[in-house]
Amino acid sequence: MLEPSLWLCLFFLTPQAAFADASTYCLYDLLVQSHAAISHCGDSLDPKSERRYQQLISEIRTNIIHNAHKPNKKGGSIVESINQYDRTVQMRTQNAGDAVCKSRNYPDSRDMLKRFTAEPNFSKLLASIRHSTKDPFTGECI
């Protein structure tokens, strides 16, 4: 999980501002970890926000695959790396048990995910991702 100061900064940023200097992979990481946490803790997004979350994740994965500028990396190996990362996050979240839900960062993480998947933030963030051609591993990790 992220450091408290990072969550605090993220909580006050708009999704577009958060993505502007952040690596695409970092944004993916934040979304996946936050979603795993709320699922583990029995919270959920409303159905529309869940669809938006799934769309964001799909678009970010596509962006990472198409824009990864790593020598000797093929799309398939990047896909497998992303899939392995997703499995690791799920396993780590499950293994943490109630500590995830009782973490002082949990409410901010949940709220950040809800803000990123709500309109108009979702549409603006999605457009930013779709138009980004930067290396997804370059940039700040908020």
Image (cartoon, helix red, strand yellow):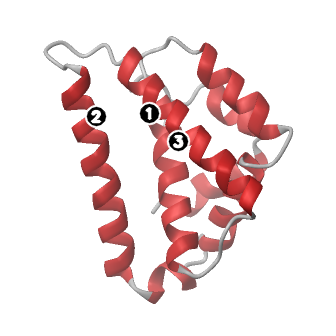
Q: Quadrant of the N terminus?
A: bottom left
Q: Position of residue 127 (x, y in %)?
A: 70, 22
Cβ atoms under marks 1 and 3 closer than 8 Å: yes
Amino acid at pointer 2 = Val
Looking at the image, residue 99 sits to the left or right of residue 116; the answer is: left
- What's the residue type where badge 3 is placed? Ile
> In the rendered image, which residue does mark 3 sit on?
57
Residue lying at 58% horizontally and 63% vertically, measured from the top left = 4
Q: Is residue 2 visible?
A: no
> Could you say where residue 111 lies in the image, as x and y percent from the top left?
73, 62
Residue position for label 2? 79
Helix, strand or loop at label 1? It is helix
Name the residue located 51 percent from the left edge and 37 percent from the top edge. 58
The image quadrant that residue 35 belongs to is bottom right
Q: Is residue 55 above or below residue 24?
A: below
Up-down relation of residue 10 to residue 25 (above or below): below
Q: CA distance from mark 2 to mark 3?
A: 13 Å
Sequence order check: which comes first, mark 2 or mark 1? 1
Q: Residues within 10 Å of mark 2 (few under 14, many from 20)?
A: some
As drawn, 132 above or below 129: above
Sequence-first disc among 2 and 3: 3
> Disc 1 versus disc 3: distance between alpha carbons?
6 Å
| Residue 48 x/y as whole percent | 76, 54
Disc 1 marks a residue whose amino acid type is Arg
